Amino acid sequence: MAKGDYIVSLDIGTSKVRAIIGEPAGNSINVIGVGSADGEGIRHGSIVDIDLTVESIRQAVDHAERMVGIHITSAYVGISGNHIQLQNSHGVVAVSSPDREISEEDVDRVLQQARVVALPPEREIIDVVAREFIVDGLRGIVDPRGMLGVRLEVEAYLITGSRTAVHNVVRCVEKAGIEVANLVLLPLAASQIALSNDERKLGVALVDVGAGATSVSVFDNGVLVGTSIIPMGGDYVTNDIAIGLRTQTSVAEQIKLRHGCASVELASEHERFKVPRIGSNQEMEYSQYDLATIIEPRMQEIFSLVRKEIEKMGYSPDLPSGYVLHGGVMSMQGASEVAAQELNAPVRVAIPEFLGVRDPSFVNGVGMIAYAVRSQFRNASSEAASYGRPVKTGGGLFVRFKDWLRDFI
């Protein structure tokens, strides 16, 4: 890849909108810029005010631009929500090459065939993901390119979403002056940096505890097999603090970030802070232990709902690889301990290993960049191997990767 190529991700969340700039480094990435802004116009992960959302996107992008000194024109945009559905699909094509060698074009065509399904008018295909390829009846093939065969099949699933929800996200980004390079399903993106290959193969739940909602996704045999949304997240903890301490929501959020502890057992009686009360000029003093008695029940409820959601999706709550959690709430002291107790399974908090984004809240944004880079890297490697010549790097990464994706849209 040419030096100077950048990938930008936009994570439009309930509490924060984040723009992250990544630079490809082979099959990996370097994070070189981060911009964030308070999320306005979004409730429980859904856009409720176009203008406020557009302004938040502009602020986040401007922040990232000033950090790196470049002008952002295109970005990969994350999408999730309870409108997302997975639908099984099957595609089959004849291998086109006279020597029966399966090429990139054959893989593209069979994935296109998998997209040919009848959908209600209010649904839209976001992406198609291969579970396995089948070559002349031989199943379990991950990458059939270069193999010999006559008949190529794919067992895939279509990621579909509400046409209204998808178009509203795209409209907000475009009104902010940014072109949507592609939409990326957030659990798939996050899995790129949050999960190991073994975890994906054995069975694992990836849980994103966001501000307005909690996303629960299950991976098994290396692929995403189910995803669901729980309409409860970190904002509920903030509201509980505001009510319990009788203070403003903005103050409650600051207290949660500075002094929050999710476990009463781990909380300190000695860490004390003052809180301005609503309707009074006086301040009341509380300890971290007092705060934990408010936070812990809500966190227990969230993780209890996660466990029930896994059961509802038809999977055992004690998955072989346990639970991998991320999201801003998971940086709170004691959060992982409460999760392990409530889920009764191994728990790990995912943190990106890149300078400047070492926080669970950045997993989605960094994951989108990794998802795009690895897809581009695989495609470029295949092109070089197939044609026996160096991969061209002209035209910019956005143009080249978007051209490749256009076949799937």
Image (cartoon, grey):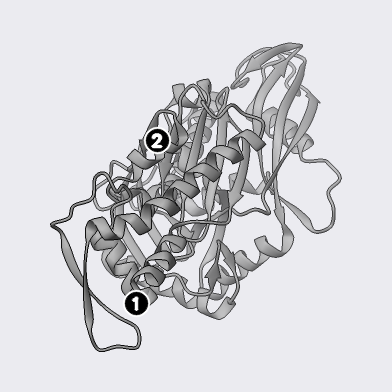
Instruction: Give percent across and percent down for residue 249.
Output: 39, 74
The relative height of residue 277 versus residue 319 in the rendered view (above or below) is below
Query: Is residue 137 visible from the viewing direction of this image?
Result: yes
Query: Left or right: where does residue 190 sit relative to residue 315?
Result: left
The relative height of residue 282 versus residue 116 in the rendered view (above or below) is below
Q: Regarding mark 1 in the picture, which secondary structure is present there?
A: loop
Q: Earlier in the sequence, mark 1 or mark 2?
A: 1
Residue at the spot 49% in from the left edge and 49% down from the top edge:
302
Q: Residues within 10 Å of mark 1 (few under 14, many from 20)?
A: many
Label total for image: 2
In-front residue for pair 84/66: 84
In-front residue for pair 259/181: 259
Instruction: Give percent across and percent down for residue 408.
Output: 68, 44
The relative height of residue 153 versus residue 80 in the rendered view (above or below) is above
- Distance from disc 1 to disc 2, alpha carbons, whole Å, reads 30 Å
Residue type highlighted by circle 1: Thr
Instruction: Give percent across and percent down for residue 128.
Output: 67, 39
Query: Left or right: where does residue 341 sit relative to residue 227?
Result: left
Task: Give the residue at mark 2.
Answer: 341
Task: Give the residue at mark 1.
Answer: 247
Residue type highlighted by circle 2: Gln
Q: Regarding mark 2 in the picture, which secondary structure is present there?
A: helix
Residue at the spot 37% in from the left edge and 46% down from the top edge:
2
Query: Left or right: where does residue 313 sit relative to residue 40?
Result: right
